[in-house]
Image (cartoon, rainbow, N blue to C red):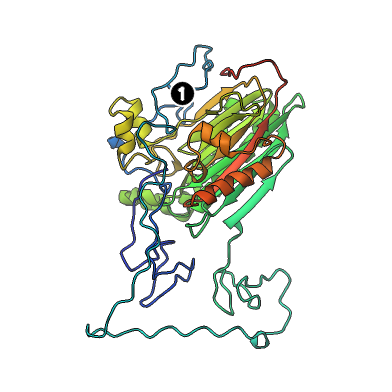
Amino acid sequence: MMASQMHQPAAGSACPSCAEPLETGDLFCGACGQDLSAVPEQPLDHPTIPIGTAAQWPAATGTDSAGAQAPTHRPGDVPGTDSGGGPLTAPAAVRYDNRPGREAPSTVSTGATAVPAQDVSSSGDFELPAPEAAPAADPRAVDPVTPPSGTKLCVACRAGHVDTDGYCENCGHAQPRERDHWERELGSVAAVSDRGLRHHRNEDSFAVSSTALPDGSPAVVAIVCDGVSSATRPDEASEAAASAANELLLETLPRGTHPQQAMHEAIVAAADAVNSLAAGSGEAEAMEHHPHRHQNAPACTIVGAVAAGGLLVVGWVGDSRAYWVPDDRSGPPARLTEDDSWAAQMVAAGLMSEAEAYADERAHAITGWLGADAYELEPHTASFKPDRSGVVVVCTDGLWNYAEAAEDMARAIPADAADRPLHSAQVLVGHALDGGGHDNVTVAVLPFAVPQQGAGSAYNKA
């Protein structure tokens, strides 16, 4: 999911890891357990948040919400034809992979340097006493009555019951959320989502499913969404978008709707679902009377892939990506999506060189997202016809920040990905966590099988 920051908590008033409010004298964050006596390491990547105003950069191109066609950015390394049958021309060099002079995403890091204790012997300040060690929980002090069916026990003390707010009634420990790490596997697609190592909650979501076309052939779906971190309830936004897009595809594909048209309609349905979160909570009315609050509407990015009828269809809004990795690694991998980002817009419009755009602090600001505050909904879709078997990697920026180029992604995913999609998704999530895990990580692996037909790795745009 790639962007710039909108809001920073006042120094000393919020946890540097999860932004939860702090009380004077706190040594550890009550929500995420962050050690407040250490200086946190600077993030490796950028949280997913949208840009401030639309007037600062060119409007994104693509298909608008009314269905009117407009030029869209296409991956330059994937030849083919457009929906009108004409040549699929390569766009301006708007890519993140292997940019000249650009280092890996790890840019600035201060390290977790411990803060030395202050000498207060002559300062006149009151010295806080060292906190007393909490006594071990005495199981005999806990109500021995058997808890009602379904009651959760604390993962820390293993004795207290967890209340509706997710905290232990005995020791007060915050419990892991169900979405901190979750996996799903169907026979033909799998996905894994993880909170990462630095976030206090998982704001990503996914949906994987399969159905049948009217002729009985299978159609496999993978949807991945990344909540916009600066927005309200980003986790709800990503969940609503993934669910709505998946349901729409499962409804339209069996009726015979062309997969590319179905993907377009799915993105529109996802946007409507996210918009309804603002409308249902009164945020839409608040935005109307207080325009400066528009940036707080629930928002997320989306990317999806459908394998159906010999076609590979991708659709997206924002900076989550889809990659193609052939089973025969002698063939070239490819990135199938182009980011809706500030840097990409600057380069595509000819206003800045690639080196200048990506050196700017606004480079990762997203220019397209789903939400009531989006300036205009512009779903991007593309359809390909691979001539050989491979896998589609559908992911948020929590993964691709650690495997940005298509070649990097191909090296990170196991060679038997087509046979073991869940294992491959787990490996890719592990790759991101090993790299630092500074963001939520979500990846779906969708195998695409075709009969072997000679050499080459050509695609045709449907």
The residue shown at (29%, 33%) is: 356
In the orientation shown, which residue stands out farthest toward the right?
216
Q: Is residue 265 left or right of residue 108?
A: right
In the orientation shown, which residue stands out farthest toward the left?
123
> Which residue bears the numbered disc 1?
68
The residue shown at (43%, 22%) is: 70
Q: Amino acid at mark 1?
A: Ala
Instruction: Give the camera-side residue of 38 and 93.
Output: 38
Query: Which quarter of the rendered picture does the C terminus lie within?
Result: top right
130 lies above or below 31:
below
Q: Position of residue 368 (x, y in %)?
A: 42, 37
Quadrant in the picture for residue 447: top right
Instruction: Give the camera-side residue of 423 and 280.
Output: 423
162 lies above or below 434:
below
Q: Is residue 336 left or right of residue 330?
A: left
Instruction: Give the camera-side residue of 369 and 431.
Output: 431
405 lies above or below 51:
above
Q: Secondary structure at mark 1?
A: loop
How busy is the neighbourhood of tag 1: few (under 14 within 10 Å), some, or many (20 plus)? few
Instruction: Give the camera-side residue of 149 and 91.
Output: 91
- Do we see residue 59 in this rendering? no
- Do we see residue 131 in this rendering? yes
Q: Position of residue 195 (x, y in %)?
A: 54, 54
The residue shown at (39%, 36%) is: 341
Quadrant in the picture for residue 141: bottom right
Q: Position of residue 136 (x, y in %)?
A: 59, 84
Q: Position of residue 74 (x, y in %)?
A: 47, 24
